Image (cartoon, coloured by chain):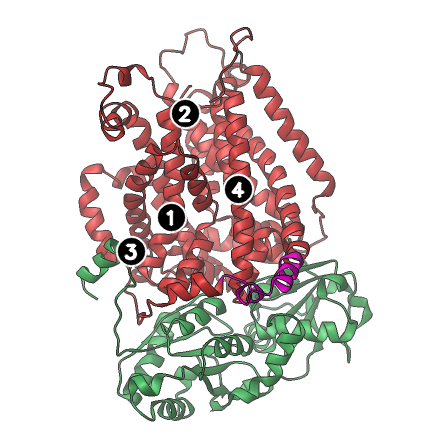
Chain colours: A green, B red
Amino acid sequence: MSFLSRAMAVVMLALPTFALADTFVFTAIPDADESRLQQRFGKVADYLSEQLNVDVQYIPVKSYAAAITAFRNDQVQLAWFGGLSGVQARRLVPDSEALAQGYEDQFFKSYFIAHESAGMEAGESLSDALKGKTFTFGSKGSTSGRLMPEFYLREQFGAAPEEIFSRVGFSGDHSRTIAQVQSGAYQIGAVNFAVWEKELEEGKIDTNKVKVIWTTPTYPDYQWTIRGDVDARFGAGFKEKVRQVLLNMNDPDLLASFPRKSFVPASNDDYGPIESTAKAIGLLD
Amino acid sequence: MITTPYFRLRSSVRTLNRVCFALVVAAALSLLWADLAVYPVDPWHELARIGRGVILPAWDEPRVLAESLGQTVAFALLAVVLAVPLGLLLAMLFHWRAVRYFCAAIRSVHELFWGLIFMQLYGLSATTGLLAILVPFTGVFAKVFAEIFEQQAHAPGQTLSPSLGTLKRYAYTLIPQSWSALLSYIRYRFECALRSSAILGFIGLPTLGFHLETAFKQGQYSEAGALLWAFVLLIATIRFWMKPVLLPFYIGLAIWLLPETVGFSNGGYLWQFVSVDIWPEPLRDAQWGAALQWYTTMFTDQVWPGLIQTLLLTQIALVLTAVVVLATYPFATRVLGGPLVRWPGRFLLLILRSTPEMVLAFVFLLLFGPSGLPAVLALALHNGGLIAFLVANASDAEAGGRVSRPDDPKGLLRYAYIETPRRFPAMLAFLFYRWEVILRESAIMGILGITTLGFYIDSAFEEIRYDRAFLLIAVTAILNILVDATSRRLRLMAHADTARR
């Protein structure tokens, strides 16, 4: 974009800014390590561009809400969403479609973790000893840090989290959840299993202080979702081409950005359980 | 305007005391219901990591750092440059009640929420970032400029021909009269704009906050430390690089530095947002019973509890802010701190006002566990640092001036009997301004499990429920207008003007 069009952004604040009409834009928020997004996903953009023969750009976003907004506004045409954010996005954009999910996302799970001061032991189900403790979710829109943990809490206790625990916080991020429970600021937390395993491997977790007390049943999580109107814009068969290119992505360096082992096919129906869960706990109407 | 009857002694002491007493009583009552529990915690491992990060900052990509610094300045500068004339224009019309309410409404919404709103309309773009700062700042400029004009002498205006229009009156008398006050306020607001611009990174603009939030969230504290230091340096050196003669050059540079907008072309979304998204479905379908039900549920579940929590914490934070100001400002002044203590004192205030509340709140969360306490402390330290800086500046401006005498007392006596009484009205005025800010900033409480209005607004955006967000923002705006009216009244009662030193 030239200096002139940037100046236009200032001068003509009331008008929408100018766009590069034939650029295919995508966004992604990985579940762990959000640093250097531009550098890491720039490489993914290069790969897509090479395979698809169109100009591909990546834009970094900060939250699921921002990703959904960008998808709805057609600022991005393809996005790597969490389970819940994907459902929300597809409800807002007719004909949009889940293309592929990570291998791990077919059987994703969350861990409930506890600080040693809570005196909790690992168990087969959520124990009544949780009642009255302090508890933190991850981000408000997270599938593994909010939606599924809240669903299983409600199922077990027949009550809202605020009624089960003496305090319910939202740490905003899985790493924060671990840090806050490890420091005892919250006694109990719910966290994405992949992030926990990664931080455990990196030696960031002191298992004398914080440990896993329950594992949720598995559910589908992250997936690539594409807008329905891409074929009209980028040529017939474009959507299928994108799906194939994503499924064929096998460079470990690229996959590490997500981080996933590989991508496997997915469909909107795979996320039916997520949608009904979100409705059940009042996150969707 | 309130006119003071002449038969009463024109001493402001009694009203000042009364206002302060009322504020303290309100805070003390809030203490009874506020949620300030302390939990046993084990924070030292994490705090040691934070400490190491702050002492040993590290950043291995100088280009990214320079870019985000540049863009932080670019957004702030352009927004202020555009907001000043707009604010000036509105200030001239400030005697119209509608204009006053309009300004109170636009400044009552936090920059972050303006950012989220404009993101619906303009995507992630330079326009979104500019508007998010520009809109609330215009409201603030209008209010403060109008107050500055109000404090000017009327005599010069009377020398003008009565047939002159308003614009000429301002151009020939009021604006020249208040020129230095206007400039110094704009300089101060530029610093605030830098903070806002950095914070907007939290929602995705490529400013310092973008990387700061990421580094902090991921626990990469040495990177977070580097970004914090960079920001502190940027603020500390404003007066060395922000020269009026360089302004045109900086504006050109800022436009060039604005981030590119990638792939956004959907301009037709504005109407959909205004006419559909922000209204609840039953209202759009004209099902009045269901709509009433929707509003009742929202009111009992979110608006009312949020309102109570917000007010309780705000009142306590306000009084604690005053305590922080009284305890810290003397160390940053020439007459009380002296050359040895003054620089460390000013440095402390710089750190307090440059560290985002979110970071402070997190540290206190680690120390005390989740409750209103970390929120109150974070708000009081941040805002206290800011006001103490302004109060210390006011003191320095007067040091060695007309009102000083060779036999002025020193030390504690001077603090108690000269400096504090002289600064007190101005301090109170600043405190009243920050009242609104503290109210707005309650949005940071999510991590603490405190359900303020800001918490619910954040949730509504996260759940893509703009109808809820709109209602809650409207309630916040009304609350802010009420607080604004109250503080205006209290200020008039207490003669707490910044200009009448």
Q: Which residues are magenta?
A: B278-297
Report the predominant secondary structure element of the magenta stretch.
helix
Q: Which image quarter is the N terminus of chain A in? A: bottom left
Q: Are marks 2 and 1 on the same chain?
A: yes
Placement of B335 over or under A160, stated as above or below: above
Amino acid carrying label 1: it is: Val
Q: Chain of mark 4?
A: B
Residue highlighted by disc 3: A13
Secondary structure found at label 1 = helix
Marks 2, 3 in one chain: no
- Secondary structure of the residue carrying numbered label 3: loop
Q: Decide: marks 1, 3 in contact (CB < 8 A)?
A: no
* Tag 2 near tag 3, CB within 8 Å: no
Image x and y of residue B359, in percent: 52, 52
Rounded to the nearest angstrom, the CA distance separating label 4 from label 2 is 27 Å
- Residue B135 disc label: 1
Disc 3: host chain: A
The three-letter code of the residue at mark 4 reads: Asn
- Chain letter of the residue beneath label 2 in the structure image: B
Dot 1 crowding, Cα within 10 Å, few <14, some 14–19, many 20+: many
Asked if marks 4 and 1 fall on the same chain, the answer is: yes
* Residue B88: % across, % down: 31, 36
